[in-house]
Amino acid sequence: MEKTLVIDNLSPFTPKILESLETIGISSNCVKADKIADPESMIEAHDRVILSGRKTYSALTNKVNSRIVRHCDAQRKPLLGICYGAEIITLALGGSIGRMTSPVVGFIDVDITEPNCLMRGREKSLKVYESHGFCIARLPEGFIRTCKSNFCQNEVIRNRAGTIWGTQFHPEKSGSDGLVVLKNFVQLPS
């Protein structure tokens, strides 16, 4: 049976990620980032990884998540970073983030700029929930943008291989559009 590893970065929305995965029939294992001593071994025991958002800054959380990102990248293991997860993917692989003029909290429209497998089932846009004060500013080398909004030019990013994805929004809080994103992610080949 395939297994999804959810890294809990102490986001208040992590329980909603687990509930959403259960809703779409996906088995998962949730581990707090600050309790992981050997992220590489943990990753190898799973078929895919989801990085949650986070509530507060933690150097240890950044270090563990960066190791996870680099290992998934090297092993071509499917990885989805949500909000902070997308930002740490960007930073760990050489991109940059920037502080927004004001935080975005609530539902917004996201435009699909490139048809892609994560948005399969949605044609032009998604209505999604956001809660963040930073945006991906410069993409890592080998990454492309697949969605944008009036608030962030890089709402959804992916590597060219299509194994690493980042969403600035929270699919777990985005109703049916978010469930489509999660379902499409877990259907990526591992």
Image: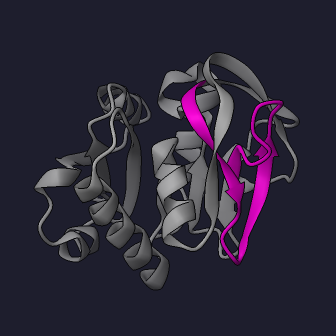
For image coordinates 35% across by 32% down, the residue present is 55
Answer whether residue 90 is magenta in the image. no
For image coordinates 57% across by 62% down, the residue present is 90
Residue 27 vs 123, above or below: the answer is below
**Position in image of residue 119 (x %, y %):** 72, 44
**Position in image of residue 142 (x %, y %):** 71, 77
Q: Which of the 4 image quarters holds residue 77? A: bottom left
**Foreground of the two, 48 or 56:** 56
**Foreground of the two, 5 or 157:** 157
Residue 31 shows in the view: yes
* In this picture, residue 130 sits left or right of residue 124: left
Q: Which of the 4 image quarters holds residue 15? A: top left
For image coordinates 11% across by 67% down, the residue present is 37
Residue most extreme to the bottom: 74
Residue 170 vs 141, above or below: the answer is above
Residue most extreme to the top: 106
**Magenta stretch bounds:** 130-156
Residue 186 shows in the view: no
For image coordinates 65% across by 76% down, the residue present is 161
**Foreground of the two, 70 or 115:** 70
* In this picture, residue 99 sits left or right of residue 173: right
Query: In which quadrant of the rendered image does the N terminus lie?
Result: bottom left
